[in-house]
Amino acid sequence: MKITIVCSSADHPINAWLDRWIAAHAGDHEISLLRSVKQLEGGDILFLISCSEIVTSAHRAKFGVTLVIHASDLPEGRGWSPYVWEIEAGRERIVVTLLEAEDKVDSGAIWAKKTVPIPKHFLAPEINQALFDCELELMDMALALHGTDPGAPQPTDIAPTYYQKRTPENSRLDVNKTIADQFDLIRVCDPVRYPAFFELHGHRYKLTLEKL
């Protein structure tokens, strides 16, 4: 099959996992990793993995199917960075969903779901490993299911919820709260792209966290 993956940012930590997946399947499929939908040519499967661009019906029409991997239990948690919001809120299990892309965000037919435990002691690298390993499993599942029309409409008896796009300000810590009170926020902040920070005595400080 001809497979295209769009991952918008070359700095996103999932790229190492995507490179591994491509290497594992390159012998059986023609696979391209792109940074922009402007580069799309067409093929059998289009995967949107951490894609921040709008993918129109004209883009999707170039492919047999366009699939998204979204880390929430859809229809709950549509929108941006769902697992970050959920772990910050104290969630210890994240549902990861494989679904078809549609014009309305995260509303397409669901192909599969997998649940990933996120222990309270996991830090950002461990969270990434657990979730990204799951994403590769769902990509493998998509290859196995391709051509079988496995999608099921999202349930209509559950009201959709939506998350906003996170900004660097969402990584701000409150110096008047304890580390324990803010531990879930600290551990879910991307230490490279969106590190936790606080302001004190007229200066801004970056906080990084490692296990000893």
Image: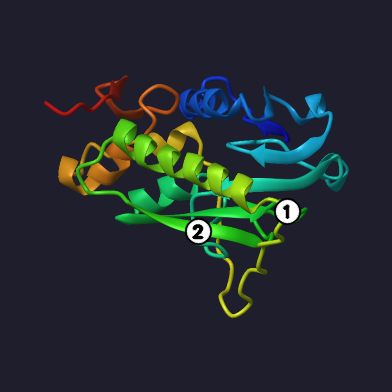
Q: Is residue 163 left or right of residue 122?
A: right
User: Which residue: 58% across, 36% down?
Assistant: 50
Separation of residues labelled 2 and 1 (CA atoms): 18 Å
Whole-percent x and y of residue 193? Answer: 45, 24
Choose between 187 and 29: the one closer to the eye: 29
- 1, above or below 120, in the image: above
Task: Determine which quarter of the picture holds residue 63.
Answer: top right
Q: Which quadrant of the figure contains the N terminus?
A: top right
Label 2 SS? strand
Q: Count how many numbered circles sit on residues in the image.
A: 2
Q: Which mark is residue 147?
A: 1
Residue 90 visible at all: no
Whole-percent x and y of residue 119? Answer: 24, 49
First-in-chain label (2 vs 1):
2
Whole-percent x and y of residue 88? Answer: 34, 49
Task: Determine which quarter of the picture holds residue 94.
Answer: bottom left
State the residue position of label 2.
113
- 126, above or below 181, in the image: above
Viewer-nearest of discs 2 and 1: 1
Q: Residue furthest front?
A: 28
User: Which residue: 16% across, 29% down?
Assistant: 211
Label 1 SS? loop
User: Which residue: 71% across, 61% down?
Assistant: 149
Q: Are marks 2 and 1 in contact (CB under 8 Å)?
A: no
Task: Determine which quarter of the picture holds residue 152.
Answer: bottom right
